[in-house]
Image: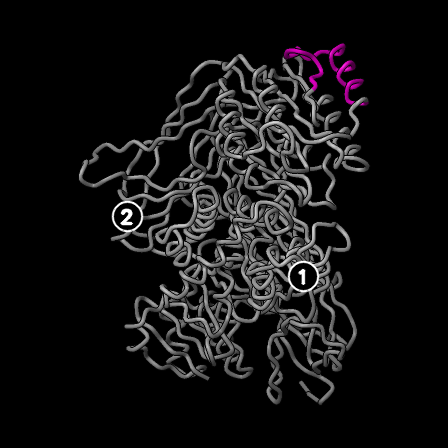
């Protein structure tokens, strides 16, 4: 083919490794020109200058994935739109690797509706092609997908400024791990684009002849709809985002009212392993009888609730009233300086009481002070029946100002009045709440706290939580691991399990429990709980692995670490600082790249990540910020802490492909289910208002305001790849798992040399992913440190 300066040759790589996958890359292969994979332009600080446009570049405008999973077979259709953003025409070919463990059938590839034939290359030929592209362009990114065969299509042009829509259809048998079907889509390959992807849409439908039980994504916060027990629809949608994490979905099938599945990961034989337990109640038909429950709504009507807030609170009350079920009991407690109940005692829900309660709600007006203690004792005193689930929805936007105002006494009084083990769900509205009081209150009363920003809709937040808890299927659930042989001297075989204590399982919801184990092997998982007022016991077989052979379930370790950090912060918040907890916080944050306001200094290139003593001291100083129980900083700290305690996915950390404001790749915590980044402006300005923050208050700013900038800077200095964290130190990236002794004995390897590619081939994809750095990197491969240098 004739090549000129205006014509470049590229390859579009479609990746389908391991399981049902497909994702496109354009790779320029012109022999006279070096052209690296595109990266999004990271504007760390505002820069008015226009970014330069490289001669060969492209953006991914849209990525649409439709998949149908039927009894372990995935039928996938991918549609991806590329735009040539460069100044020259690209000549492109499509290349997509084969999976190593299953055949792809019915494969069809179309470009703007025209079908293209593909040539099969075996794994050896494919590796040579990858290595040639990596060597020529000095771009290690492709190492992540070496080791499989691939199909290669013919060449076609993409003129400058033009778009091409590529569609790929195929069917494939998905892998199965420990009883769960594993669907993986390498979404992170879309990070090779000059701009954020405008639209990412993934929609999967699952169909099964057996009952679908656990449906779980460890990577993304997906929406799951389950119309019946044999069908499920999973969706994920994002706009203007640079994806940084591959999409993964696990599901299983089975019978019974509750299905439990245990996955385990143990990277080191001599150390405790990590387990993930998934439990899902049976999906009941809409017309089936649901367990009866009691709900009391305790609503703040003090003067600070006037205006829009009291209107939204009334709407939230109406939502709950209109969604109670026949047989439920309820009441409403409205409080300011005085405490008033809808009725003196609980009411049985029916059409008559619903209308009367709606009339009471219309008469709830804001005015007066805040008697939190009196309101809680009035509500809890009405609860007498412990045989049914009891829930208190408690809403406040301020501090206690009337009656008992000491937070410890308020918590103690509520706990003493809670004779029926009711669960309190607290909603803190705005920045003026005593967030520490709310966290202590719900921790002592088996519930959880939710924090509603000033610009959020109270009705939306309350209704979301109520939809989750409206149908309890099994209450006061305890999970026990029973081993056939257990020696007392070996200690507790299971430890540090989160969530802690008994929990409730709700219809349509899934329990995600993580913990650590000392003893591997066969184990029986016993689930005990109350169903319809009667006790029920279920047991399931499981196996805890002795030594993991790969990193298939490495995400379990990091998910546990995230929840453990949340638990450490909660213990410090409620009981005060101590050296042991602070050291553990630093260790987990360093190893896993979990940056919080108290550990964000790890992103500073001048911080020695191995200096435990100095870093513990710095973290201890910053943990003093937890003394701020109200204001924007108090609000933000408790919201972040709670989101980490409840994390169900491993949040993305800063990556080189994700600039601030681009979503998943930005500040850690934004993916924990709460918009932590949205609170950062308030922290920097120290304000309490939703729009224009007030003047900074010195106590409010402190170390947290400093951490806001550090966490933005982390996008440049911290990378999470696979299950590891890398820190930029000087001219190199350092693997957090490399110790001092390994660093001293590090083997130097020239990047793009024969030895470099030999390492990639030797360790395979699990470890080759840690070689994809443009700059020098110090990495630990099988307990040997290697310094990879350009």
Pointer 2: what residue? 546
- Location of residue 691 in the rendering, given as x and y in whole percent from the top left corner: 77, 52
For residue 285, above or below residue 308: above
Determine which quarter of the picture holds residue 47. Answer: bottom right
Is residue 98 among what the camera can see?
Answer: yes
Determine which quarter of the picture holds residue 329. Answer: top right
Q: Residues within 10 Å of mark 1 (few under 14, many from 20)?
A: some
Q: Residue at x 52, y 49 (%)?
A: 626
Left or right: 359, with 175 as reference point: right
Secondary structure of the residue carrying tag 2 is loop
Tag shown at residue 139: none
Q: Residues within 10 Å of mark 2 (few under 14, many from 20)?
A: some
- Location of residue 506 in the rendering, given as x and y in whole percent from the top left corner: 55, 28
Pointer 1: what residue? 661
In the picture, which quadrant includes the N terminus?
bottom right
Pointers 2 and 1 in contact (CB under 8 A)?
no
The question of residue 336 being in magenta is answered with: no
Front residue (pair 234, 624) = 624
Write the start and end of the magenta stretch as one range: 340-362
The question of residue 341 being in magenta is answered with: yes
- Location of residue 554 in the rendering, given as x and y in whole percent from the top left corner: 42, 53
Front residue (pair 189, 343) = 343
- Location of residue 764 in the rendering, given as x and y in whole percent from the top left corner: 40, 66
Left or right: 129, with 302 as reference point: left
How far is disc 2 from disc 1 in space, using C-alphas? 42 Å
Secondary structure of the residue carrying tag 1 is loop
């Amino acid at each position: 083919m004739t090549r000129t300066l205006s014509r470049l040759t590229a390859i579009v790589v479609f990746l389908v490794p391991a399981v049902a996958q497909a994702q496109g890359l354009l790779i320029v292969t012109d022999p006279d020109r070096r052209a690296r994979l595109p990266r999004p332009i990271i504007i760390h600080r505002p820069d008015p200058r226009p970014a330069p446009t490289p001669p060969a570049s492209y953006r991914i405008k849209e990525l649409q994935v439709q998949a149908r999973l039927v009894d372990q077979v995935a039928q996938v259709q991918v549609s991806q739109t590329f735009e040539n953003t460069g100044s020259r025409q690209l000549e492109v070919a499509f290349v997509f690797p084969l999976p190593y463990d299953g055949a792809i059938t019915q494969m069809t590839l179309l470009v703007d509706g025209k079908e293209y034939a593909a040539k099969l290359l075996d794994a050896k030929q494919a590796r040579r092609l990858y290595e040639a592209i990596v060597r020529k362009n000095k771009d290690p990114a492709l190492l992540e997908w070496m080791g499989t065969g691939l199909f290669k299509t013919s060449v076609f042009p993409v003129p400058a400024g033009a778009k091409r829509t590529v569609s790929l259809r195929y069917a494939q048998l998905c892998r199965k791990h420990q009883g769960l079907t594993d669907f993986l889509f390498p979404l992170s390959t879309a990070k090779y684009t000059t701009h954020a992807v405008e639209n990412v849409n993934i929609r999967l439908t699952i169909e099964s002849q057996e009952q679908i039980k656990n449906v779980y994504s460890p990577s993304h916060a997906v929406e799951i709809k389950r119309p019946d027990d044999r069908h499920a629809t999973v969706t994920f949608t994002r706009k203007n985002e640079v994806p940084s994490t591959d999409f993964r979905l696990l599901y299983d099938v089975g019978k019974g009212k509750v299905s439990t599945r245990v996955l385990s990961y143990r990277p080191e034989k001599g150390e405790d392993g990590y387990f993930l337990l998934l439990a899902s109640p049976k999906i009941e038909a809409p017309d089936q009888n649901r367990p009866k429950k009691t709900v009391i709504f305790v609503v703040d009507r003090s003067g600070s609730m006037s205006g829009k807030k009291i209107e939204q609170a009334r709407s939230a009350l109406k939502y709950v009233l209109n969604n109670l079920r026949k047989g439920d009991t309820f009441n409403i407690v409205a409080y300011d300086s005085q405490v008033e109940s809808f009725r003196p005692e609980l009411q049985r829900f029916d059409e008559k009481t619903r209308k009367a309660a709606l009339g009471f709600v219309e008469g709830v007006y804001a005015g007066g002070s805040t008697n939190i203690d009196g309101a809680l004792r009035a509500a809890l005193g009405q609860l007498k029946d412990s045989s049914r689930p009891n829930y208190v929805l408690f809403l406040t936007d301020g501090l206690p100002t009337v009656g008992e105002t000491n937070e410890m006494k308020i918590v103690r009084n509520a706990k003493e009045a809670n004779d029926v083990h009711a669960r309190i769900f607290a909603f803190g509205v705005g920045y003026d709440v005593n967030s520490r009081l709310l966290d202590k209150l719900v921790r002592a009363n088996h519930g959880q706290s939710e924090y509603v920003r000033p610009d959020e809709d109270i009705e939306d937040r309350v209704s979301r939580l109520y939809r989750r808890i409206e149908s309890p299927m099994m209450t006061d659930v305890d999970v026990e691991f029973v081993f056939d042989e257990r020696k007392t001297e070996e200690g507790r075989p299971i430890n540090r399990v989160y969530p802690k204590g008994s929990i409730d399982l709700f219809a349509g919801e899934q329990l995600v429990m993580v913990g650590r184990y000392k003893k591997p092997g066969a184990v029986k998982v016993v689930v005990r709980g109350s169903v319809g007022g009667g006790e029920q016991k279920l047991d399931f077989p499981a196996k805890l692995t002795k030594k993991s052979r790969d990193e298939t379930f490495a995400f379990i370790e990091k998910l546990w670490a995230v929840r453990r950090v949340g638990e450490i912060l909660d213990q410090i918040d409620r009981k005060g600082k101590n050296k042991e907890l602070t050291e553990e916080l630093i260790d987990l944050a360093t190893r896993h790249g979990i940056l919080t306001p108290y550990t964000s200094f790890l992103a500073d290139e001048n911080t020695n990540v191995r200096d435990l003593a100095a870093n513990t001291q710095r973290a201890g100083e910053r943990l003093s910020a937890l003394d701020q129980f109200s204001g924007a900083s108090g609000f933000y700290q408790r919201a972040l802490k709670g989101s980490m305690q409840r994390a169900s996915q491993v949040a993305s950390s800063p990556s080189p492909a994700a600039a601030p404001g681009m979503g998943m790749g930005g500040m850690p915590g934004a993916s924990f289910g709460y918009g932590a980044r949205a609170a950062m402006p308030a922290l920097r300005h120290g304000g309490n208002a939703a729009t224009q923050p007030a003047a900074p208050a010195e106590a409010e700013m402190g170390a947290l305001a400093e951490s806001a900038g550090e966490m933005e800077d982390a996008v440049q200095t911290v990378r999470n790849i696979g299950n590891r964290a890398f820190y930029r130190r000087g001219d190199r990236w350092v693997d957090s798992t490399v110790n001092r002794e390994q660093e001293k004995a590090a083997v130097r390897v020239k990047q793009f040399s024969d030895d470099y590619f030999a390492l990639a081939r030797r360790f395979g994809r699990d470890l080759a992913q840690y070689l994809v750095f443009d700059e020098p990197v110090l990495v630990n491969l099988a307990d040997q440190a290697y310094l990879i240098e350009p």
